[in-house]
Amino acid sequence: MANVEHRGPAGPAGAVSGRTSALRAGLWLIAAVLAVRQLVAVLSTPRGERLTDLETWIGPQGVLHVKDSLYDAPDRFTGTPFSGLVLKPFSRAAEQALGWGWTFGSLALVVALGLVAARALPQPVSRRTSLFAAPVAISLLMLSLPVRNAFTTGQTSIIPVLLVLLGCFAVRGERASGVCVGVAAALQPTVLLFAPLLWFTGRRRAAVSSAVTFAAATALAWAAMPHDSWTYWVHHLAGAGLATHPAANANQSLHGMLLRFGLEGPLEIALFALLAVTVAVLGLRRAVTYARDGQLLLAVAITGCVAVAVSPTTWQHQLLWVLLAVVGRVGKRASDRYMWPVLVVLALTLPATMMLPNMTFLEPVRDNIVLIAALAAACVVPFLFRTSPLYATPVPTEYAAPVPARWSWVPLVPVWRRVVARPNLILELLLIRVGYSAYQQVRLAATGGTISGGRATAEAHGRQVHSIERFLHLDIEHWVNHTVFHHAAWLKDFFNFYYTSFHFVVPLSVLGFLYLRRPADYRWARSALGFATLLALIGFWAYPLAPPRLMPGLGFIDTVHGVQDFSKPNYGTLTQLTNQYAAMPSLHFGWSLWCGVVIVVLSRRWWIKALGLVHPLCTVSAIVATGNHWILDAVGGATVVGAGFFLTYALQGPRARTVPDETRKTDADPARAVDGAVAGRAAGSG
């Protein structure tokens, strides 16, 4: 993009500028759609289920209407006394426009937050980044769990973040900056950690002003509400004891994490204090260092992450600081540059159950995944300094020899063309995990989220498939199923084991081997598998189909799970987690066929190729013998796999290893090889 900016308005630069303008308009459209979606989601929620926290505070029976202490009401107020003092005058107006006014006001705050953050990016940034930063920032904020939670519950957590950003980047004059930070700290006390950041980065007037403003606001609230102030600051130790369920997963602070580990009492308090002081010292030192390097937005994000960790209670709507940490650049290699932003965005936009599977040994990580991200940003992640030569120009990734894409007009083709030597492992694991979560959700959504929701339709489709197979003389499922069950017990056990054990093990093993030993082929194979699975999900959604074992009246035997009550089928621990009417196409056979094709294409030894062919053969025998699929399901699985390889070839071009002889000859001459690589990349980006 920097090269384009120096070409002038004529020629290719004009075309690039046009594409950039179109892309920018598209990003703003996405941001607008996400904003409208959020508004509709809130305003369409029934009155008693939306803005529940705001209703608790300023509704007709809200906390702010009580005559006694704010903190003695049944629905306990957890904000500072200054928050209550500020909100009380707006109680009556808020009652009259509780939904519309607050929701549109919150939307305006989010937009302002995104605009300020985009303008605060550490310089220098390319023209393209400066154009795209605002809509991307607003879109990420709209998608983030903290903003969605704040919209839904009616929380005020966006205001302190915006006040700090305004004080650090928008307001002129150090005293005015300090006032903004001080007011934010009066609303959320741990924000006072920004005062040391201001002090040690040379903005001492702002630091003093923030401390004075915080003290003045707190004193004002104390004078107006002495009993409430004593209760909050002294009796409950700055609000630490106000949380009803501090050990809940929603409390993403060190205190909440220690409580979830089973610690309590003086030991937990002492350990929390020690950890909090350690994180505060390490985090603030890092923040000051990056601020002096010219990365003030990153320093603000790190300080906010420290506040998240050391606060006694940090609820989901208070975690926006972690999202701001994506502005830090991490990684020496170009392929590693996106690892940290992707981790943060996924952690802040997806539920923890989608990030990690629901396994006991993973609970300490899954229940604290946002806290771990905050601690990493504050104390661990090695963000690059602007003085580092790698900040602007990371070590280039090794690319395979350029090959032509088939459909150059598809925007994502240049990305698919770039076959790196070895993709980042963490991103690949996250991609697989998130992709599989989406796969599970779509399977369930195909029947309305319940196992029995699509039963009638699925059984009707089952009768259609059975009739087609009888017409084509392919209906061998019943004969195979009963023959294996009644006359070959050892074969039944083998097929049961094969069906339940190899579906995931073999594809993951193939992917793991390719990642380690054949990285240039890994993305080709993974892309084909992804396309095939995506097409299969469309099939599950469009054509729910009952497998033979769940078809009443046809006499099939479920050899894996036993005799079934068709109105309430029971197939073990997965009964409530999977849609058993997602049979067409068969991904059991499709994934096994993908494994076979990859092994046959890439292996050099004949006996390994033979094993690759045996796996889909055993799989199709198992799915038929156990009564889990029709023959036509396997045909559907083969179809989506073939389509997956076709789409990969059409969009990405041939595999990186299948390079024409002319390219090999060109590579023999270093100068011509460089010219050819540059030309290939230019063609791919066009």
Image (cartoon, helix red, strand yellow):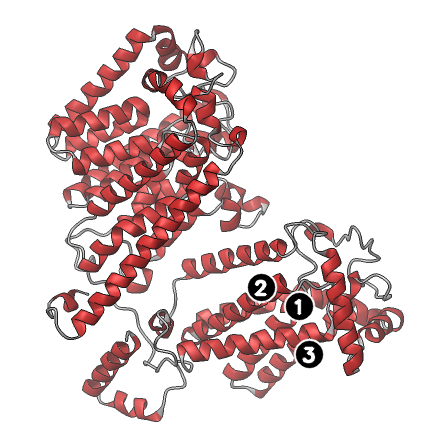
Q: Which residue is at 55% across, 67% downward? A: 533
Q: CA distance from mark 3 to mark 1?
A: 18 Å
The quarter of the displayed image where residue 505 is located: bottom right
Q: Which residue is at 56% across, 45% downward? A: 361
As drawn, which residue projects farthest toward the front?
A: 96
Badge 1 is on which residue? Answer: 584
Q: Position of residue 551 (x, y in %)?
A: 80, 63
Q: CA distance from mark 1 to mark 2?
A: 9 Å
State which quarter of the image contains the C terminus: bottom left
Q: Which residue is at 30% across, 10% downward? A: 222
State which quarter of the image contains the N terminus: bottom left
Name which residue type carries label 1: Met
Q: Is residue 438 above or below residue 192?
A: below
From the viewer's perspective, is 460 left or right of 114?
A: right
Confirm or deny contact between disc 3 and disc 2 (CB under 8 A): no
Mark 3 or 1, nearer chain start: 1
From the viewer's perspective, is 282 left or right of 311?
A: left
Name which residue type carries label 2: Leu
The crowd level at tag 1 (other Cα within 10 Å; few <14, some 14-19, many 20+) is many
Badge 2 is on which residue? Answer: 537
Name which residue type carries label 3: Leu
From the viewer's perspective, is 295 left or right of 61?
A: left
User: What is the number of callouts on the image?
Assistant: 3
Q: Is residue 675 above or below residue 525?
A: below
